[in-house]
Image: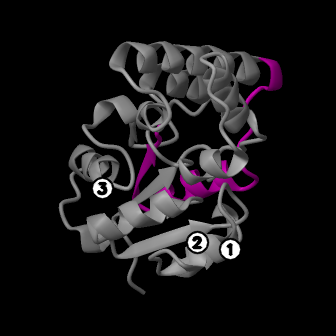
Amino acid sequence: MKVPALVVFDLAGTTVEDRGQVPAAFRAALAAHGIAATPDQITRVRGASKRQAIRAFVTGEAEAARAYAAFQQALAARFEADGATAIPGAAECLRALRAAGLKVALTTGFDRDITAMLIAALSWQEAADTIVCGDDVAHGRPAPDLIRRAMADTGVPDAARVATVGDTTLDLEAGAAAAVGWNIGVLPGAHGRDALARSPHTHLIGSVAELRPLWRL
């Protein structure tokens, strides 16, 4: 049975529950700058670098920086109020893959400061071999930069031996751009089955809890 050398997971919505905190914080940040975004507009940028997503709505570097700072503050307040919860089976999946000798990476469109808050809340400091954030790379999804940085960090140069797992169309587009061997969408997440089915993928599964049977691990 062929198995990957590296599994690259998205964070929010894939391994960590997103109970609406991210889109709510996004709407609040834009509203504070007089911008009304529709739910469909926000859904389309799910999975992207949050800085890039802000720039899709806000013109001017200074204004975009202020809007991003407002997003950070709003999201931090929501996570502090609600806490952070792993998707059922996610922690067990990460541990089992690493115990089987696979490398594991977590990637996210969040910058390092928000990511660190989430990782600390989950006690996941040792859950992955590397964690790659939006401010670690030049381009967010759908560019393959997050995946390629994870490959470099873990010493896995062959994309055919990499699996990516995400809940958005941008996750799947990034996996295709990186030419990974397994490009896996999980349901339910930010984007529904129809949207993920129309995106490049090798598998669609119900959640990360269903991942290990793909490789009989």
Is residue 59 found inside the magenta-colored segment of the image? no
Find disc 1 in the rendering and name its residue. Answer: 193
- Name above or below for residue 173 compared with residue 150: below
- Name above or below for residue 211 compared with residue 19: below
Find disc 2 in the rendering and name its residue. Answer: 196
Question: Which is nearer the N-term, disc 3 or disc 1?
Answer: 3
Q: Nearer the viewer, residue 217 or 118?
A: 118
Which amino acid type corresponds to the residue marked 3 in the rendered image? Pro
> How far apart are labels 3 and 2 at the CA level?
17 Å
At x 61%, y 28%, the residue is 118
Q: Residue furthest left?
A: 157
Q: Is residue 216 visible?
A: no
At x 69%, y 44%, the residue is 38
Mark 2–mark 1 contact, CB under 8 Å? Answer: yes
Stretch in magenta:
81-109
Element assignment for label 3: loop
How would you rate the neighbour count of disc 1 (Cα within 10 Å): few for under 14, some for 14-19, many for 20 or more? some
Element assignment for label 2: helix
Q: Residue furthest bottom?
A: 1
> How far apart are labels 2 and 1 at the CA level?
5 Å
Find disc 3 in the rendering and name its residue. Answer: 144
Mark 3–mark 2 contact, CB under 8 Å? Answer: no
- x%, y% of residue 136? 30, 32
At x 41%, y 36%, the residue is 52
Q: What's the coloring here?
A: one colour
